[in-house]
């Protein structure tokens, strides 16, 4: 979908393609302006990662400014993405979703807090998702994967996205949270409204995100009320009965935090798994390499997360400053496409290759700094289990002839329509 049209940065009005463009602020130099739409990347038909990386070939400055999506900066350079994530004193989490108008409607906790306010909430999140807790659920997670794969294997075909990726991590997460699978489609609908909001103007996108945020909040509130004070060991009970700085978790914060967990647990792994498996379907040599050596398979997971990042959130400039020679104003927004770190050729040689021998892997797929993904142990385990159990049962899979996966860009990238076929003899 190439929606590019004439740039009208001076008038700040709708251009020919109906997308709102804002006027360029005075402090933004003309030579840093590029027409990049994070929700409709040029070249997205070829793939989400390919579309972002294609921009590197266009001789991009390290920091560019786009008049689209409310007007914002984009960090195009891998180390810069990490540096911004790591420094909340210069780059705040006060608003993290774009357009900024939509980000201001996003009320989840504690992603919009900076340290020190963020720290005690983060400690509570860690108690529910730390490595020890994730190891405890590994057997159940593996059983879920095996059941699903054994249903699919005799068929000789599937839509990997619909039949596995959209089910496996969701089943795992709903079980951990003590929620019925029948609620999953509703939650998926809210998650999509938050991470890929629709609308041609920032206001329309803000309305979509607001509705999705309200949907999450209305869903979790009665569940929180029911589990508060109980002795349940599910993730939600552990959170709502936990403490923050020695005090019970306040009700409004509990609503924001449980909603965030649902959002984080439902949309990310789903899409990551599909991206990874499309690559393997196209590279049987890599499948053979993974199958030849269990240790190599275990080590490959980090390389997979480097190669297939899915998150593009933002930071708000915390104070007027000159950053890497560019003047930034308090309140400016900077998009941090994590894809531009793992796939930066300066950081990782031949970045589009999955190199199972790669040393010193560099990426920011799980973010960095105080908000680094709290779900990463779960995500890593789900990826490992999928590789182990799928490749054991369906090693020789490929995309069916004429397959045309549909890619979406946004706060979380997505891919649908992933038809695989394999021999059942
Ligand atoms: C492929 C899988 C995943 C990826 C790529 C991913 C990526 C990220 C990134 C980039 C951040 C940083 C956000 C920021 O700094 O503003 C983050 C934070 C977070 N993630 Fe994940 N995530 C994944 C899986 C999960 C899962 C499975 C869960 C939940 C079970 C989860 C829950 C969270 C939470 C709660 C935060 C906020 C942490 C905080 O604000 O301190 N994530 N994730």
Image (tube, rainbow, N blue to C red):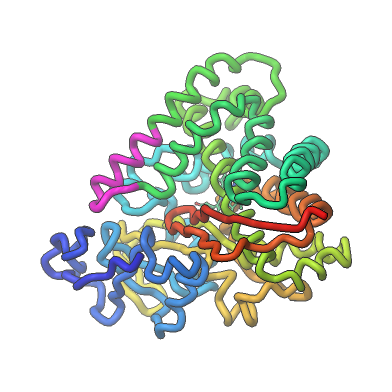
Magenta highlight on residue 129: no
Q: Is residue 261 left or right of residue 326?
A: right
User: Which residues make up the magenta segment?
Assistant: 198-213
Determine whether, in the image, residue 352 is placed left or right of residue 66: right
Give how far across and how far down residue 243 sits, in percent: 61, 27
What residue is shown at x 60% (from left), y 75% (from top)?
A: 352
Towards the viewer: 179 or 337: 179
In the displayed image of the protein, which residue is found farthest to the bottom? Answer: 59
Q: Is residue 340 above or below residue 91?
A: below
Q: Is residue 212 magenta?
A: yes
Residue at image point 44% right, 57% down: 408
Q: Position of residue 65 (x, y in %)?
A: 31, 70
In the rendered image, residue 420, in percent from the top left (x then y), is placed at 65, 57
Q: Is residue 305 above or below residue 226?
A: below
Q: Residue at x 52, y 43 (%)?
A: 118
Quarter placement of the C terminus: bottom right
Q: Which quadrant is the N terminus positioned in?
A: bottom left
The residue at the far front in this view is: 425
Tell me residue 119's x, y (percent).
Answer: 57, 43
What residue is drawn where x is 79% and y is 59%? 395
Q: Is residue 131 visible?
A: no
Q: Is residue 383 above or below residue 79?
A: above
| Residue 63 seen anywhere in this rendered image of the structure | yes
User: Is 375 above or below relative to 189?
Assistant: below
Q: Please, what is the dominant secondary structure of the magenta stretch?
A: helix
């Amino acid at each position: 979908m190439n929606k590019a049209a004439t740039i009208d940065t001076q008038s700040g009005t709708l251009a020919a393609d109906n997308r709102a463009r804002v006027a360029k602020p005075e402090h933004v130099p003309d030579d840093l302006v590029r027409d990049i739409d994070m929700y409709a990347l040029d070249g997205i038909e070829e793939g989400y990662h390919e579309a972002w990386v294609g921009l590197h070939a266009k001789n991009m400055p390290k920091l560019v400014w786009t008049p689209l999506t409310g007007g914002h900066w984009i960090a195009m350079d891998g180390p810069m993405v990490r540096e911004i994530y790591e420094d909340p004193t210069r780059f705040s989490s006060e608003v993290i979703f774009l357009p900024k108008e939509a980000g201001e409607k996003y009320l989840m906790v504690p992603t919009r807090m900076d340290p020190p306010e963020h720290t005690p909430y983060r400690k509570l999140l860690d108690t529910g998702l730390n490595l020890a807790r994730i190891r405890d659920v590994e057997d159940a997670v593996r059983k879920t994967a095996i059941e699903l794969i054994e249903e699919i294997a005799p068929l000789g075909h599937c839509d990997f996205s619909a039949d596995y990726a959209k089910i496996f991590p969701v089943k795992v997460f709903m079980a951990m949270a003590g929620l019925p699978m029948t609620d999953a489609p509703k939650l998926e609908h809210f998650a999509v409204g938050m991470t890929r909001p629709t609308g041609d103007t920032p206001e329309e996108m803000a309305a979509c995100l607001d509705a999705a945020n309200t949907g999450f909040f209305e869903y979790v509130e009665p569940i929180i009320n029911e589990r508060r004070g109980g002795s349940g060991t599910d993730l939600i009970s552990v959170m709502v009965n936990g403490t923050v700085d020695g005090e019970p978790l306040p009700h409004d914060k509990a609503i924001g935090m449980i909603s965030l967990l649902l959002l984080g647990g439902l949309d990310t792994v789903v899409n990551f798994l599909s991206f990874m498996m499309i690559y393997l379907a196209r590279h049987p040599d890599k499948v053979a390499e993974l199958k030849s050596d269990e240790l190599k398979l275990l080590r490959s997971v980090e390389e997979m997360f480097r190669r297939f990042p899915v998150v593009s959130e933002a930071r708000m400039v915390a104070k007027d400053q000159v950053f890497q020679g560019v003047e930034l104003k308090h309140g400016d927004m900077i998009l941090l496409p994590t894809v531009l770190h793992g796939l930066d050729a300066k950081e990782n040689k031949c970045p589009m290759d999955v190199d199972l021998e790669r040393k010193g892997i560099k990426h920011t797929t799980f973010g960095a700094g105080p908000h680094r993904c709290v779900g990463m142990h779960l995500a890593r385990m789900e990826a490992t289990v999928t590789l182990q159990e799928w490749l054991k049962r369906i090693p020789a899979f490929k995309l069916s002839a004429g397959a045309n996966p549909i890619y979406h860009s946004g706060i979380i990238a997505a891919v649908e329509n992933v038809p695989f076929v394999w021999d059942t003899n």
